Image (cartoon, rainbow, N blue to C red):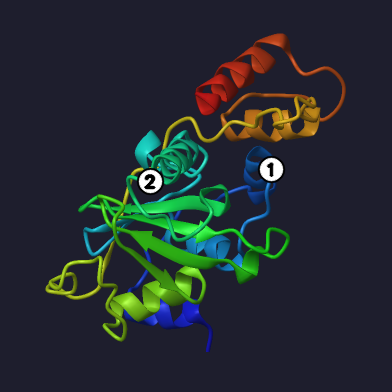
Amino acid sequence: MTSLEDLTRLVPPPASPPPTDWNVIESLLQTPLPDDYKQLTDTYGPGVFCDFVHLYHPHGATEWVDLTGPMPARLRRQLVADRDSGTCPVPHDPENLFALAVTDNGNRLFWITTPGEEPDAWRIAVDQADGRAWYTHDGNLTSFLVALLSGHVRAPVFPDGLLGNGAFFTPARPADDGPPATPNPAGATTSREVIRQWARSQGYDVPDRGRVPGHVIQAWERAAERFRR
């Protein structure tokens, strides 16, 4: 039995979560993502576990829970600043941390993205809101959620009463405008096919071949600029 099967038995998912085009998302982020996260997201959609753990989602309703929004980069910059100033201990290289969830208490969950070419081997790190204590889970996100929500493991940075009302999931409204595709960090031009996929996800009527209409490219560029901020 897989960790996802364990999780769905423990916490029933919603009936019809929104679909995600992972080719577009991974092109946008310029990195492959763990299979367990993609399966988890396809099964549950955007939402929150136990009214406490808000998973980042490619269609997060706000920038605070949007996997493709500005928060992962902002948090990484903050961790770099904390490390360089010596204000807070960071047990992992901040450049290898990718934020994937936040809690109501301000804890952040991160992927430890090493080895970079093997996302299914990425482990999970959790910090306290003040960054002064960390917990590392030697497994993927889904196995962490199973251990946490079953009560078999207690992350010391989480409150004791997390499971006071049992384990449950509350769906959130997905974002209206979806994640944009964006040029890669080296400045290479994003393929027209990626723009077409993004445009169709936003309801634009674009041809399968040939020129992408100018107003569609402009809309994509505006969305990409929001992502880069």
Query: How many numbered callouts?
Result: 2
Q: Residue furthest right?
A: 210
**Distance of mark 1 from mark 2, alpha carbons?**
30 Å
Q: Quadrant of residue 119?
A: bottom right
Name the residue type under label 1.
Gln
The percent position of residue 101, horizontal first and vertical second, equals: 39, 53
Query: Could you tell me which residue is drawn at 59 percent across and 31 percent down?
Result: 180
Name the residue type under label 2.
Gly
Above or below 148: residue 114: above
**Left or right: where does residue 206 sit relative to residue 202?**
right
Residue 86, disc: 2
Front in this rendered view, residue 213 or 191: 191
The reply to whether the C-beta atoms of the residues labelled 1 and 2 are less than 8 Å apart is no
**Left or right: where does residue 35 sit relative to residue 157?**
right
**Left or right: where does residue 166 sit relative to residue 188?**
left
Query: Could you tell me which residue is drawn at 44 percent across and 41 percent down?
Result: 66
Residue 220, disc: none
Front in this rendered view, residue 228 or 156: 156
